[in-house]
Image: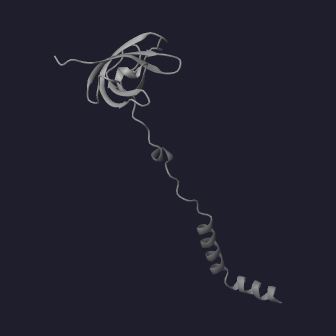
Amino acid sequence: MRAFYLTRFVRGNRAYFVMILTATLSVCCQQPPRVNEALLTPTPPPATGTPLVMPSPVLGKPYFGTGVITIINRKEGWVEINHEEIKGLMPAMTMEFLVKQNSLLNNVQVGDRVDFTVVETAKAEFITELKKKTVQ
């Protein structure tokens, strides 16, 4: 009996039924707006110039450098130096170096400009000579 009344309601209000059905389907089936993914992922600027390429270091070879001492750790036996480029070994940077002998740290202090010799080993870079640079 109920089916009869429902069928009669749909036939009598067919235009309204079609409009409601269309509106419901259009809202439910709508896809979210597409986002341009290219705008979400930042693109790094193109590199300019040539990349910095350093040769592989030769183990046991002495390399000479100049820099300013920023930290001295006498207990652990290392020093941090803000150094210029060490030709054939590395570009300019601030780096910690182990010292071969703690006595090398006795005649320098933080802020001193120094000349040093560093030797690359299989374990690390060791400073074998460290001398305070004289002011000229």
Q: Nearer the viewer, residue 59 or 104?
A: 104
For the N terminus, the image quarter is bottom right
Residue 51 in view of the camera: no
State the image coordinates of residue 122 (x, y, percent, origin top left): 53, 17
State the image coordinates of residue 16 (x, y, percent, origin top left): 63, 80
Q: From the viewer's perspective, is residue 35 above or below residue 43?
A: below
State the image coordinates of residue 22 (x, y, percent, origin top left): 62, 71
Residue at 52% across, 57% down = 33
Residue at the far left: name it: 136
Q: Nearer the viewer, residue 60 or 107?
A: 107
Q: Quadrant of residue 9?
A: bottom right
Residue at 31% across, 21% down = 84
Q: Is residue 55 left or right of residue 3?
A: left
Residue at 36% across, 20% down = 104
Residue 72 in view of the camera: yes
Q: Quadrant of residue 133?
A: top left
Q: Quadrant of residue 72?
A: top left
Q: Nearer the viewer, residue 52 or 33?
A: 52
Q: Is residue 69 left or right of residue 136?
A: right
State the image coordinates of residue 136 (x, y, percent, origin top left): 16, 16
Please state the total of marks drawn on the protein image. 0
Residue at 47% across, 10% down = 60
Q: How is the image coloured?
A: one colour
Q: Is residue 84 left or right of residue 7?
A: left
